[in-house]
Image (cartoon, rainbow, N blue to C red):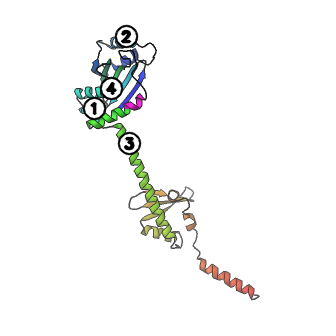
Amino acid sequence: MIGLAKACSGGGTLGNYVMDKEKGYELDRNLLCGDNPKEIMEEIKSMQELNQRASNKTFSLVLSPDIKDGQKLTNKELKDITRQYMGKLGIDPDKQQFVAFVHTEKKHKHIHIIANRVQTNGKLISDHHIGKRAQWAAHEIAQERGLTSAKQIMIDNVKSVESQKDNFKSLRKEIFNKHESVIKMNPKGFNEYQKSMEKLGIKVDTVFNKKGIVQGHKLTDKLSGQIFKASEINRHLGLSSLMKPYTPLEPIIKIAKLIGKSNDMGY
């Protein structure tokens, strides 16, 4: 369920749009006798003459149930949640002029409400943060009545994304730890590194560009199927250096020592 609300100047355009019988049907009204949009808006305007200072004297509200909820809600239930919604916004449905119209021209059945902001004493009903309050009002009604809340879906989606980020962070750390454990074993080149990582459940592939030049590497966690660029695991994995021909350090050191001894002996 979604709730929308704003304070506006009202007028014939709003009345004609909301109370268009080709779009739907009237659901509820209070303190209004008019037979058409023009008469109803004139009645509202007459009451608004009690306040000469404000410009936005009308509330334009929308209450939109989830498509599936809208299909099963009865008119009585729609009327009840309309009045409940208004009450949560500080609009007394028994004291304020209002008309509620159900729009059914689309699959998504929704309720439009025109309500007078001006009270019988000439004072205005507050429109402070009316948009945000409308969202929370719809959310609360949905929770109370076991209906689908758009805000709850949004909250759940955010939590899901955050949870997924945490899982990815944990998985990246796990892959990096496996990488470090293999590096400590001093693999003899990239192929040996790949085989060692494969044994730990991580498939390492080289990515080439169209010219056949190494562009990077990707690491796949075989258990979860998640694929990461090497840079996403750590910026300094150094896999490219592993691809260079392996040259054991020990023979080089021995040769260097022999060269040194020869020089000492005058050869």
Q: Mark 4 sits on what residue?
A: 86
Mark 1 vs mark 4: give the one in front.
Answer: 4
Mark 1 vs mark 2: give the one in front.
Answer: 2
Disc 3 residue type (three-letter) = Ile
Which residue appears farthest toward the bottom when viewing the image? 265
Disc 2 residue type (three-letter) = Ser
Q: Looking at the image, is mark 1 or mark 2 earlier in the sequence? A: 2
Q: Mark 3 sits on what residue?
A: 155
Disc 1 residue type (three-letter) = Gly
109 and 60: which one is in front?
Answer: 60
Please state the extent of the stretch shown in magenta in the rendering. 125-134
Q: Secondary structure at mark 4?
A: helix
Q: Mark 2 sits on what residue?
A: 46
Residue 128 is inside the magenta segment = yes
Q: Looking at the image, is mark 4 or mark 3 earlier in the sequence? A: 4
Compared to 150, does 197 lie above or below? below
Mark 1 vs mark 3: give the one in front.
Answer: 3
